[in-house]
Image: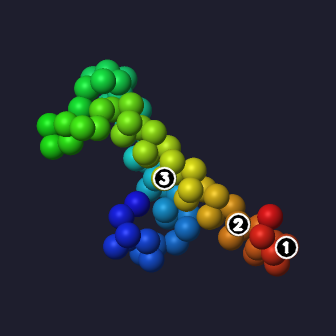
Amino acid sequence: MKEEYINIGSEQDKVIEEAGEVFQAIGKLNRFGPENFHPDRPKSNNRHELIEELDDCIHAMQVYRKLLYREKYGQDG
């Protein structure tokens, strides 16, 4: 996620957005192949793009999980 968007939207919104980006990256990888790349980003192929999106989604889910845990138990889990 771009730094300028970090404080926009709820943690739940961020998980939803990042999950959507994972679906999009999987679709591109399946449709065009793992080694194909966007012309604007020739140094990054579809496999790398998917890994980046997965990392972003995992991070968003971890932050959201901590928030939910804190709301329920009053501490990080």
Mark closest to the chain's N terminus, 3 or 1: 3
Amino acid found under the numbered disc labelled 2: Lys
> Helix or strand or loop: what does disc 2 sit on?
helix
Is 41 situated above or below 36? below
Query: Against 74, is 33 above or below?
Result: above
Which secondary structure lies at badge 1? helix
Outermost right residue: 73
Amino acid bearing label 3: Asp
Residue tagged 3: 56
* Quarter in which the C terminus is drawn: bottom right
Question: Which residue is drawn at the image coordinates 57% and 50% (left, top)?
Answer: 58
N-terminal label among 1 and 2: 2
Q: Which mark is residue 24?
A: none
Dot 1 alpha-carbon crowd within 10 angstroms: few under 14, some 14 to 19, many 20 or more: few
Most foreground residue, 55 or 66: 55
Q: Nearer the viewer, residue 11 or 62?
A: 62
* 30 displayed left or right of 39: right
Report crowding for label 3: few under 14, some 14 to 19, many 20 or more residues within 10 A (C-alpha). Answer: many
Mark 2: give few (<14), some (14-19) or many (20+) Cα within 10 Å: some
Label 1 belongs to which residue?
73
Horizontal side, residue 63 vs residue 6: left or right = right
**How far apart are the alpha carbons under marks 1 and 2?**
10 Å
The quadrant where residue 25 appears = top left
Which amino acid type is shown beneath numbered disc 1? Tyr
| Residue 69 percent coordinates (x, y) | 77, 67
Q: CA distance from mark 3 to mark 1?
A: 26 Å
User: Element under label 3?
Assistant: helix
The Cα atoms of the two marked residues, 2 and 3, are separated by 16 Å
- The picture places residue 59, in percent across and down from the top left corner, at 56, 56
Query: Label 2: which residue?
Result: 66
The N terminus lies in quadrant: bottom left
Q: Residue at x 44, y 46 (%)?
A: 53
